[in-house]
């Protein structure tokens, strides 16, 4: 299996799904609507909103689709 940087891959995916990144700090990526994504492992991402864990995601695509849909519902 190929080695890749999970943070770089996550940032690429967020850009691809047109989800703007407000800031990043180490393993944390901060988005609009008080979303934070914590990179737990290579293929494990924890979605947090308002300091509450929403869910773990094993795939970047599933994570991005969830965020995209939730942002559309709350617009």
Image: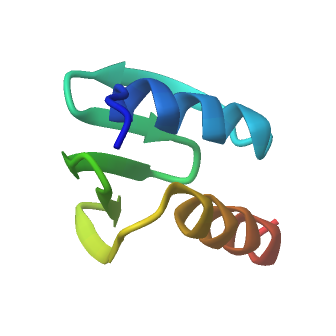
User: Residue at coordinates 49% horizontally, 38% vertically from top-left?
Assistant: 10
User: Residue at coordinates 71% horizontally, 64% vertically from top-left?
Assistant: 71
Q: Is residue 40 left or right of residue 9?
A: left
* Quadrant location, the N terminus: top left
Q: Position of residue 53 (x, y in %)?
A: 25, 72
Q: Determine which quarter of the picture holds residue 39.
A: top left
User: Residue at coordinates 20% horizontally, 22% vertically from top-left?
Assistant: 26
Q: Identify which residue, 13 or 52, lies in the foreground.
A: 13
Q: Is residue 35 left or right of residue 18?
A: left
Q: Position of residue 32 (x, y in %)?
A: 58, 44
User: Residue at coordinates 70% horizontally, 42% vertically from top-left?
Assistant: 19
Instruction: Report the coloring of the rendering.
Output: rainbow
* Quadrant location, the C terminus: bottom right
Q: How many marks?
A: 0
Q: Identify which residue, 37 or 1, lies in the foreground.
A: 1
Q: Is residue 37 above or below residue 48?
A: above
Q: Is residue 42 above or below residue 65?
A: above
Q: Determine which quarter of the picture holds residue 5.
A: top left
Q: Position of residue 69 (x, y in %)?
A: 74, 73
């Amino acid at each position: 299996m190929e080695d890749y940087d999970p943070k770089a891959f996550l940032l690429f995916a967020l850009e691809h799904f047109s989800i703007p990144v407000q800031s990043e700090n180490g393993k944390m990526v901060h988005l609009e609507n008080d979303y934070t994504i914590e990179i737990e492992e290579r293929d494990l991402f924890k979605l947090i909103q308002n300091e509450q864990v929403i869910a773990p995601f094993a795939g970047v695509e599933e994570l991005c689709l969830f965020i995209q849909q939730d942002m559309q519902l709350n617009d």
